[in-house]
Amino acid sequence: MIIGGEVVQRAVAQLSGHTSYFVPTAFSFGWVAYSVNAVLQAIGEGRLMPPADCDSIMINATNGNAKVNQSWILGRIVRDHETDTPDSGLTVTFFRTSPIAKHTMPGVPHRDWLYWSGVVVMVIQQGIAVIPGVVNDDWNTLIVTVAGTILALAGGAMPQWQNEKWACRKLKGGREVVSLTRGNGSKDVIVIINEGAGKLRLEDLANIRDSRTSYTIIFTSVLAVLWFVLLLTVAGLQNNAWYLLAVGSLGMVQNYIVAGVSRSPGAFGIHLEPKGGNVVHKEKVFEALVQAEKTERGVGTSLLPIFFPGGLREHEKKWVKEREEYYAEQDKVTPTPTPPISPGNTLHRRPVEKTAQS
């Protein structure tokens, strides 16, 4: 019961956040180690969610502001993003956030096969644990399995999981356009066009916000004590230990799969749909950014400092100047808050840095 505490944390992070607070992360050998880590994190950092495990950058296409993404779910969306384009060059994929509806509520994840796998594994675990009771009239294995399952469900039901995963303000209207990429040298950029009141404000989500609550420390501490009591109980079992080993091993396999498997953005509560003509791919990075700029204003120009930190060639500077003049003419007819896009604009030359907690 002392293997894979970090794996359990990531597994719970994958499945938590549903409005029912039912998080089917199976009872396994990693929960005791995780329970101790959870107390330390709750007391120290005030967090339950793991840090982002995929390095990425978020760029605001409107003002060029770039920041290191610190959101675990946005990092997972970048990690799990796949395209059918060649590995060479640059691919820019455009998405829109889905209209708010019953099954596309912002911050409410889809229940995919990964979610239901936990329910299936829990049922199988109880079935294995009942065998020694039926055959040998030894119900200790079933008691331990049921107790472990209840504690696992309690650990995932804390409201702070949901608060941390979507710790951001919501749009009151208008739109935001943000790009996500692993940085210079990456072959993929994800562009999300987010518009409409009630949507999650993605630029906020990329920051770490303090969502700690006093009852989380108390709750995690109580759970840690109960897990140690269960550990001592297991240590005292002498008969039918193989059944308990099978139960714990099955749960551990489920935890490992859940912690690492790829998922769709909707399973993270960010519901996306492809934008028309949504994929831009070019062998030359600059050409891809030019095409991306034609698809959505500000996307290509805001990415220039990321992919060309050393500056542009003369013909590339000429294109930037032409776009600036074109936008200036457009803004005379329809004013827009988008700033000038010249290479010297500090908004587009701002260094990438971690933002302070807010």
Image (spheres, grey):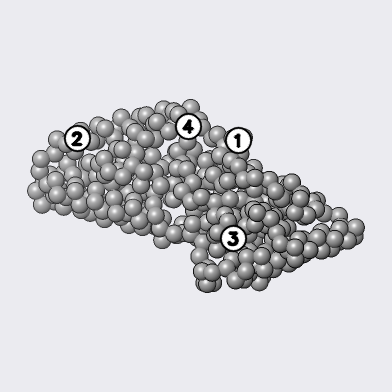
Q: Which of pointers 1 and 2 lies earlier in the amino acid sequence?
A: 2
Residue visible at 65% across and 67% down in the picture: 288
Name the front one of labels 4 and 1: 1
Tag 2–tag 4 contact (CB < 8 Å): no
102 or 301, which is in the foreground? 301
Label 2 secondary element? helix
Name the front one of labels 3 and 2: 3
- C-alpha gap between disc 4 and disc 1: 14 Å
Q: Which residue is mark 4?
A: 45
Tag 4–tag 1 contact (CB < 8 Å): no
Residue visible at 13% across and 39% down in the picture: 237
335 or 174, which is in the foreground? 335
Q: Which residue is mark 3?
A: 189
Query: In the displayed structure, does residue 241 sit left or right of residue 61?
Result: left
22 or 86, which is in the foreground? 86
Residue visible at 33% across and 52% down in the picture: 256
- C-alpha gap between disc 3 and disc 2: 51 Å
- Residue 25, position as x, y percentages in the image: 36, 48
- C-alpha gap between disc 3 and disc 1: 25 Å
Label 3 secondary element? strand
Q: Which of pointers 4 and 3 lies earlier in the amino acid sequence?
A: 4
Residue 75 position (above or below residue 226): below
Q: Report the amino acid beneath label 4.
A: Glu
Residue 356's label in the rendered image is 1
Q: Report the amino acid beneath label 1.
A: Ala
- Residue 123 visible, this angle: no
Q: Which residue is mark 2?
A: 233
Q: Report the amino acid beneath label 3.
A: Val
Q: Quadrant of the C terminus?
A: top right
Q: Which of pointers 2 and 4 lies earlier in the amino acid sequence?
A: 4
Q: Which of pointers 3 and 1 lies earlier in the amino acid sequence?
A: 3
